[in-house]
Structures are given as C-alpha cells and as structure tokens.
Image: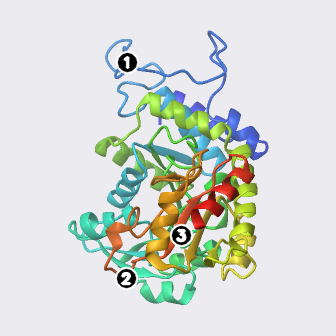
Amino acid sequence: MTDQQQSSHREGHLKGGFETRAIHAGYEPDPTTGAVIAPIYATSTYKQDGVGGLRGGYEYSRSANPTRTALEGALAAVEEGERAFTFSSGLAAEDTLVRATCRPGDHVVLPDDAYGGTFRLFDKVEQAWGVEHTPAPVTDVDAVRAAIRPGQTKLVWLETPTNPLLNIGDIEALAAVAHEAGARLVVDNTFASPYLQQPLTLGADVVVHSTTKYVGGHSDVVGGALVVRDLDLAEQLVFHQNAIGAVPGPFDSFLTHRGLKTLAVRMERHCDNAEAVVEFLTRHPSVVQVIYPGLEEHPGHAVAAKQMKRFGGMVAFRVAGGEQQALSVCERAEVFTLAESLGGIESLIEHPGRMTHASVAGTELEVPADLVRLSVGIETVDDLIADLDRALG
C-alpha cells in the first residue's frame, strides 16, 4: 500500500456516525486548493521524480488512482471494514474475488435464488475453470451446512435480502457455519446497502456490492466493490485487482463517491415509500402475495429486524392473473419505469422471469412467472401508488 493510499485508508476509519463517515471518510480537503470534494484525476500515468520516485505511490491508474482511492476509503468506512476495492461492475468484483480465493477443484455454496448474473458467472464461467457450486436456501442454516464440502468449500455465498424473492439469511449464524468448515462467508449487500446492514460486524469475511445500485443511487454509473477486514485477504485482492484490471475509471469513481455521500437520506425515503407501497399492495384484490421483509408474516422478518436498520426499498409481489397479468402490469406502469437494475432515485418495475433472471430459466433457481419486482424510488409516494393502481387495473 502506498503512503497516500495508507493516508486515505486511515481516513476511512474516521469516527462518527454513518452519515459523517459517508461524507468525510477517505479524503481530506486538498492541501493546496482546499477543494472539499475529491477531484477527478483524469490521468492514466504519473510523473516520477527519478526512477521509482513515485509521488504518493501512484504510477499507473490501473494500479491506483486518487479519485478511486477516495471512494475505496469511504466504502471501507461505511462498511466498517479494513480495505475496500472497487471494480468496473459488480460481476467484475465477484470474479476477482473468486480468482483470488479459489482454485480449480474448489467448491462454492450459492443461494438457491441468487441473482441471475451471479448464477451465470458460476455456472458458465467459474465452473468451466474448475470451481464447482451447490445451491442451498439461505433461510435454512442446516441446508447450507449440508451443502458445504469440508476441505473443498472455500466460499459460502449469501445474498440477504435475496434477488428477487427477498429471502433473508442469518449472517451471524451462517458465518459460524462457514467458519466451522474453514470457508469464508461472502455477503452480497447490494439490496440492503451499507446504510441498512453491515455484514462484517456480524461475522462475514467479505462484502460484495454492485455499486451501480444504491451506493451510486442515480442510475448513471456501473460499478462494483469488495470490502474486507482480513488484511491478508486484502493483499491477495490488491494483487488480483491490479493483475486482472477490471477497475473503474476516475469519472465512474467520482460519480459513485458522490452517490455514497447521500446514501443515508436516500435510503430513508426509499424505505418510507416502500412501506407505503407494500400497504397498498396487501389490500389490492389482484395481488395474491406481497413479499417484503418488513411484513410480520414474512418468514425472515425476525432475522431481518435483528440485522437490518430498516427493510429496504425492494418489493416483490405475485398477481392473480399469472404471467400474462404480471407482464401487463409491467407494461402499463408509467411512473414506474420498465427497466432492469435497481436502487436508483427513480422507481423501476420488471418481470424477473423474462428480464433479470432469464438466465436461470429451467434451472433450480427459476423464479415464478407471476412475479413482479419493484425498486421503489424516492418520488412522491401518492404518485407511485396511483400508478400501480392503474397498472393493476
């Protein structure tokens, strides 16, 4: 780690509440100009003061860039980790983690309703490389334990809430199960965001984010991140991040960092709006099931209440008219935009079976055809409810 990166790393441990760390950690005002926001260092290389005389340790922007360093320091702070690493996408982050921690012949336990892109990565890419995987329900600690192959399983992969069925895994309990078998627990914290949940404090070894989603928060940048506490693992990730090279550019890093600074206030509004939408959907005659961890009847409600600050902005529901009605609802919505992704300021609606989870059709991870997924944004909530009322007919 370079001197300047060590400085930003220490700044990442700024004391204070979440909002204070999100705004101030990772960067101090520029000593020359006083700039309070980390500048966009649009440079690929750096002048050396003699051979090997690096200023702040920077030599080439694949290895490190000051704008990216500031973002990584802030992410480490809000996730209460030791180091954070950012990437050009969430899947690039996942692939880099697997390359750093697994070898051909190793094994990974995946959620049985994992994000379709994650499943595709393991099923089509990592498996061809020799890394095997077994799906297991994140809600069942014993099933996860049974899926582990002691000595062969290197990673137990957890999404909580899961995508798109919003199942809840007990991070603390699953960390204990993974560690008993000598494996690491990886938690995809994308749906919860660092504001609602900090898995490293509950025993997880690695946190994964698609920073495209709530961290960036404005649907204008694609990115990913890994956050860890173990410094030995951090050194492996330093090497692989640089060797593989799937890093974000300075403009992407700047946009993601800017989004992180307002994460807390955005998440509060996402949660407020989601709760109101859920209340409406539970009373609608065309809706046969509402899936949201904040509902007391949700099977993971108690665990979610234990490990999450609030229950998030993601909502799923099933309709009485089957797949055709689900498709119709998606197409008739106007304020809710029909689009993939999630976590932005605007509300999105999608049909997982035909869109984000089409890659798992015909597998054990296939999602119900009558399922609709909402990413509830921060618009006027009455407009969102009126839009869903029209779309549901």
Residue beneath label 1, please? 46
Identify which amino acid the numbered label 2 is placed on: Glu
| Front position in the image: 277 or 72 | 277
Q: Nearer the viewer, mark 3 or mark 1?
A: 3
* Chain-order first, disc 3 or disc 2: 3
Q: CA distance from mark 1 to mark 2?
A: 50 Å
Q: Are marks 3 and 1 in contact (CB under 8 Å)?
A: no
Identify which amino acid the numbered label 1 is placed on: Tyr
Q: Is residue 40 above or below residue 228?
A: above
- Tell me the residue at 49%/84% (across/down): 144
Q: Is residue 376 above or below residue 56?
A: below
Relative side of 33 to 245, left or right: right
- The circle drawn on residue 162 is 3
Q: Is residue 111 in view? A: no
- Tell me the residue at 38%/54% (across/down): 91
Mark 1 falls on what kind of element? Answer: loop
Identify which amino acid the numbered label 3 is placed on: Thr
Percent x, y of residue 266? 69, 45
* Chain-order first, disc 3 or disc 1: 1
Percent x, y of residue 114? 45, 70
Q: Quadrant of residue 223?
A: top left
- The circle drawn on residue 364 is 2
